Image: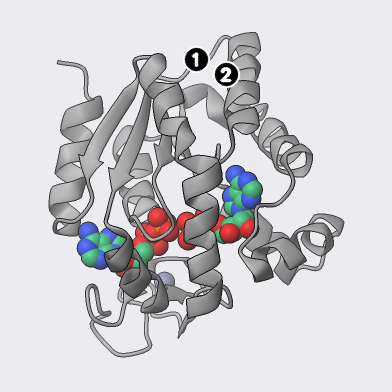
Amino acid sequence: MRLILLGPPGAGKGTQAQGLADHFDIVHISTGDMFRGAIKNQTPLGLKAKAFLDEGELVPDDVTIGIVKERLEKNDCDRGFLLDGFPRTLIQAETLTEMLANLGKPLDGAININVDRIKLMARLTGRRICRHCGAAYHIVFNPPPKEGECGKCGGPLYQRDDDNEATCENRLNVYESQTAPLIEYYAGQEILHNIQGDQEIDKVFADILAAVTPQ
Ligand code: ADP
Ligand code: ADP
Ligand code: ZN
């Protein structure tokens, strides 16, 4: 199974990704996680990416495409993969199509999770992330069993630097102008699945499975 997760920041891509990767036994590839890891470790990639993440702007296509290409060429992707947060521009999408055609691994589906903008702001500004396992929580909509502590691994929760109001506004604008056009692109390839993201987390998951599982 080879899938991509589309949808605005805060739609629930990360929340759904791990369950989907486990269910299909495929590799979860999150460009956002890759950039945050590189920034934390102060690698050359992290130094290049930091200013863009801080502003809520997209990291340049050549940099982003480079790291995804490298990742997709690894052997573990033979069993399938789930791209979370990539592609985000038309150039990324077109390059991905070409890249996967060359590898003989075309996409099986593009899952587009829809949520209203007002809800997205509330989701993003209340999001908390586990420092150890990366699980996402929400202070109101999806609180951890114990405040400030991950229910899966016990790790401490933190708020991402870019989950402040000003940066979130910008990220949502960037999504509208640069990423939303991909919905048309994948509809044209006849692999798009639109999912209502404003439902309970388990219901969203069930809808995604029903959409991508062959009848
Ligand atoms: P994305 O990866 O698309 O940016 P996340 O998966 O990190 O989104 O989710 C954003 C925030 O919304 C998190 O705080 C998460 O706990 C919360 N969230 C995710 N799915 C739902 C849902 N179905 N209902 C309510 N809140 C949700
Ligand atoms: P969210 O889903 O909450 O927007 P992500 O973790 O997917 O967050 O992305 C965080 C940031 O990483 C983005 O705001 C952007 O700066 C950078 N980023 C992630 N994926 C891409 C991509 N495909 N192209 C360019 N920049 C990206
Ligand atoms: Zn954890």
Looking at the image, tell me whether mark 1 or mark 2 is earlier in sequence order. 2
Q: Quadrant of ligand 2?
A: bottom right
Query: Left or right of 41: which side holds 83?
Result: left
Residue 97: mark in rendering: 2
**Which residue bears the numbered disc 1?**
106
Vertical placement of residue 126 versus 205, above or below: below
Quadrant housing residue 44: bottom right
Query: Left or right of 118: which side holds 69?
Result: right
Q: Which amino acid type is marked by label 2? A: Thr
Quadrant housing residue 144: bottom left
The reply to whether dot 1 and dot 2 touch (C-beta < 8 Å) is yes
User: Counting other residues with Cα less than 10 Å from the Cα at mark 2, is it few (<14), some (14-19), or many (20 or more)?
Assistant: some
Query: Left or right of 115: which side holds 204?
Result: left
Please say whether residue 152 is visible from this viewpoint: no
Vertical placement of residue 71 versus 129, above or below: above
**Closer mark to the observer between disc 1 and disc 2:** 2
Please say whether residue 41 is visible from this viewpoint: yes
55 or 136: nearer the eye? 55
Find residue 193 and report its horizontal and vertical position in percent. Answer: 27, 29
Residue for point 65% across, 58% down? 57
164 or 71: nearer the eye? 164
Position of the N terminus by quadrant: top left
Q: Which amino acid type is marked by label 1? A: Pro
